[in-house]
Image (tube, grey):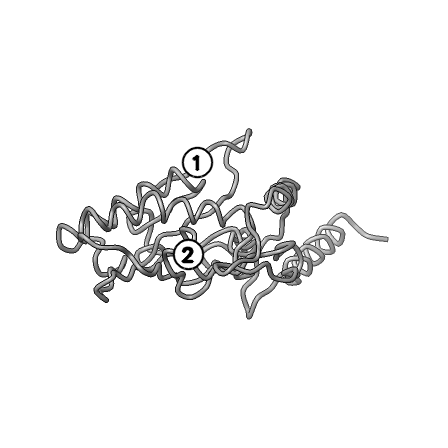
Amino acid sequence: MFTSFRLRQFVAALTALMVSACAGPGVYFVDTYAPWRKDAELACLNAGLAYTSAFGTVEPELDGPKHCGAIRPIKLTYSAYGQVEMSPAALVRCPMVPAIDDWVRLSVLPAARMYFGQDVVAVENFGTYSCRPRNNRRGGKLSEHGFANAIDISGFKLADGRHISVKRDWNGDRDERGFLRAVYADGCQHFNTTLGPDANAAHRDHFHFDLARHGKDGLGKVCR
């Protein structure tokens, strides 16, 4: 029969085992899932907001460890209805597709024309889907990347071949700095979480955008 001490030991060991089941290569995370994720993805898919085209393909289910994954993720090769390449292609769940499209079309392209007199031809990203904890911190909550509900933007390629880098140009020359800060600030209009170089050291070289729900009503935003 368990003593209270032995019972606490057993519960602690069981909890550790459950967390370790949600492991990437040596990285553990706290595994949670909210019903709104499935509802939002199905609503988007049923509304036809993302579909197979020359710009993106509907992929098979992402069935990652535990709650990682997506029902029918979209491999987005071009954004803004084919105007701008995603480099590399972004694997995201359905609601992220119109958010990315609108951000590129309504913010990135106009800002590039204003600051550089030319178009952006590619949006460069570090990645989208990755079953891991936030900021790769062992024991942290599961990242939105684990749900294919986030994208990390590292830079932009202009029509003349020039590259604008978040890491190098965030505090760079006037035009580069102005462009990056403009498109970053506009991210708050299209995404629910917007993190960049001024947020913390983990985001010094990229913009993190996701569609997590914040606040009791799920309508809050985090922009840092």
Can I make out residue 176 in this image? yes
Can I make out residue 138 in this image? no
Number of on-image labels: 2
- Within 10 Å of the Cα at label 1, are there few (<14), some (14-19), or many (20+) other Cα atoms? some
SS state under label 2? loop
- Within 10 Å of the Cα at label 2, are there few (<14), some (14-19), or many (20+) other Cα atoms? some
Looking at the image, the residue that sits furthest to the top is 217
Of residue 116 and residue 88, the one placed in the foreground of this image is 116
For label 1, the residue is 221
For label 2, the residue is 82
In percent of the image, x 59 and y 43: which residue is there? Answer: 44
Residue 68 at x, y percent in the picture: 61, 57
Sequence-first tag of 2 and 1? 2
Residue 179 at x, y percent in the picture: 22, 49
Distance Cα–Cα, label 2 vs label 1: 28 Å
Q: Answer above or below: position of 84 versus 110.
A: below
In the rendered structure, the answer to whether residue 207 lies left or right of residue 4 reads left
Amino acid identity at mark 1:
Lys
Of residue 104 and residue 71, the one placed in the foreground of this image is 104
Residue 115 at x, y percent in the picture: 18, 49
In the rendered structure, the answer to whether residue 179 lies left or right of residue 50 reads left
**The quarter of the displayed image where residue 37 is located:** top right
Do callouts 2 and 1 mark residues in contact (Cβ within 8 Å)? no
What is the quadrant of the C terminus in the image? top left
Looking at the image, the residue that sits furthest to the bottom is 25
Amino acid identity at mark 2:
Gly
SS state under label 1? loop
> Depth-wise, is mark 2 or mark 1 nearer the camera?
2
Of residue 42 and residue 84, the one placed in the foreground of this image is 84
Residue 98 at x, y percent in the picture: 48, 46
**The quarter of the displayed image where residue 84 is located:** bottom left
